Amino acid sequence: MAALTESQRSAVESTSSALCIVAGAGSGKTRVLTLRVARRIRDGSADADHTAVCTFTRKAAGELRQRLRLYGVPVSTPAAPGSAPGPGVRAGTLHQMALTLLRRHAFDNGEPPPAVAEHRFRLIRDIVVDPTTASAVETEIGWAKARCLTPESYAAAAHHAGRHPVVEGDQVAGAFAAYEDALRRRRSLDLDDVLVRAAALLRADSAFAEGMHWRYRHLSVDEFQDVNPAQFGLVQALMGDRFDLCAVGDPNQAIYGWNGADPTLLTRLPSLVPDMAVVQLGENHRSTPQVVAAAAAGLGRTPTAPPRSVTAEGPMPVVAAFEDERAEAEGVVSLILERSEDGTPWSDQAVVARTHDQLAVMGRALGSAGIPYRMAPGPESPAGDAVRPTAARGARRGRSDPDTDDAVELATFHRAKGLEWTSVYVVGLEEGFVPIVYAETEEAQDEERRLLYVALSRASHDLHCSWARARRLGNGRQMEREPSRWLAGVARLSRTGSGRITPRDAGRRIAEIRASLNR
């Protein structure tokens, strides 16, 4: 507590039971959230056995539990289906909370616990045989369920939202209806259904709701900018009329509207929850002033200003243009080698791109240079596979070993969210990628710009941005490219890179590595 800044202390010590913490990149939100929970339990304004902290991934929930234990807070252990959770703060995902409520209700009423169909794609693939079409339908059904839509209301809502899937709206609606029939025949729910069903039970069964309102009196929700209407419905139903809610989030990092999230919920929350206080964490403790300024320039004007840097000065970011994607990849490899020679570990460096195809080009270049790399793990996946150098030509893919934990990470903009590295290379900053070509509505464009901000703000010290004047696309055709419309603002606060590879760089270093491996 003694090390907190003024704004952090205000959030931790606020006596308001309803609190919205606007926590930007690098502002220490996890520390503040868990310290607030610990402070309330310590001073008696909350009870550990009646406190729930919810987030969006199992990994994030594990980090919350670890931090709470560090502060001496008793944390509930997972319970068997139908039984009550153990004593202490319950920290988990919103889906886990919803499933716990459904199992409790079934147990209380002598009913079998709900069956959950976790693999939506498999069922959809039985309905829509073509895998590409099935994947598009799965995305649309996920968006519809997050927005509490039915097969009948999907098409109109999708049109209003400006969605343009590769599948016609009527075809999606038909597959959606068939999917719902398949779930009913199996007497199953999917993961999004558990949210809606749990909220509905709390509204319909007053006795059950009274018990759950008593059990979960104090509620905290992390990453609130990613909440969708189905999840917010559960939060509202779980609060009842107590309004004891701590919501933490950053409107500038709301990047899941395409998947059903409502980026306006966080900013509207104080008008939706009575007597909610608002505290903004205004300091970035992670990134240099130069990185923060470049990321803010990429974001542009926004109602909520990003937090200012309170760290030491660092080097100016770099913006460079390369002749094509191969030259860009080799140039970035050159820089990664230089950072390594200067003492920056591989694992403190990351290449971030908008698409997986752009990362594939980088992976091949890293492999050819003998540099170990791995894909950043997805939200719920285990640690990514690593690629380690070998004495053979190029590099072959292998499983991660303890001695390859030190590897350069490759991440899409979405996967980079929540992560940080000393040196970050943001590549492929071209029109058609940033913003992505299918982002046509104003809302989609705004989300793309926030996505760029997320990518740029991952760096703590070194930030290198680049684009290619020509790029070979997936169909093998090479096309001329233009820099992203948002790169000019970043460039004004950066120095210009040469866009060339010098003999000192990749060629010589690669030869040295190969020579050492062949000895």
Image: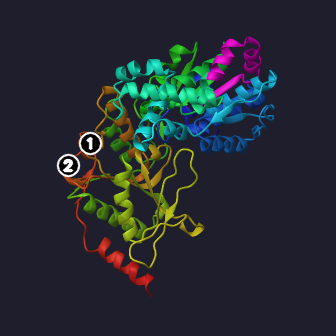
Q: Quadrant of the C terminus?
A: bottom left
Q: Which residues are magenta?
A: 197-221
Q: Nearer the viewer, residue 410 or 108?
A: 108
Residue holding disc 2: 481
Q: Is residue 201 magenta?
A: yes
The label shown at residue 432 is 1
Q: Nearer the viewer, residue 181 or 64?
A: 181
Disc 1 packing (10 Å; few <14; some 14–19; many ≥20): some
| Residue sitting at x 31%, y 77% | 508
Q: Nearer the viewer, residue 164 or 185?
A: 185
Furthest residue in direction bottom, as rendered: 519
The label shown at residue 159 is none
Horizontal arrangement in the rendering, residue 499 relative to residue 67 (left or right): left
Q: Is residue 149 above or below residue 36?
A: above
| Residue sitting at x 72%, y 16% | 209
On the question of residue 255 being in view, the answer is no
Please report contact status of discs 2 and 1: CB closer than 8 Å, yes or no. yes
Residue 41 coordinates in the image, percent (x, y): 74, 30
Element assignment for label 2: loop
Q: Amino acid at mark 1?
A: Gly
* Magenta span dominant secondary structure: helix
Separation (CA) of disc 2 from disc 1: 9 Å
Q: Quadrant of the N terminus?
A: top right
Q: Quadrant of residue 492?
A: top left
Whichever of callouts 2 and 1 sits on the residue coming sooner in the sequence is 1
Residue 61 coordinates in the image, percent (x, y): 64, 40
Residue 175 coordinates in the image, percent (x, y): 46, 29
Q: Amino acid at mark 2?
A: Arg
Disc 2 packing (10 Å; few <14; some 14–19; many ≥20): some
- How many numbered discs? 2
| Residue sitting at x 41%, y 70% | 341
Q: Is residue 212 above or below residue 405?
A: above
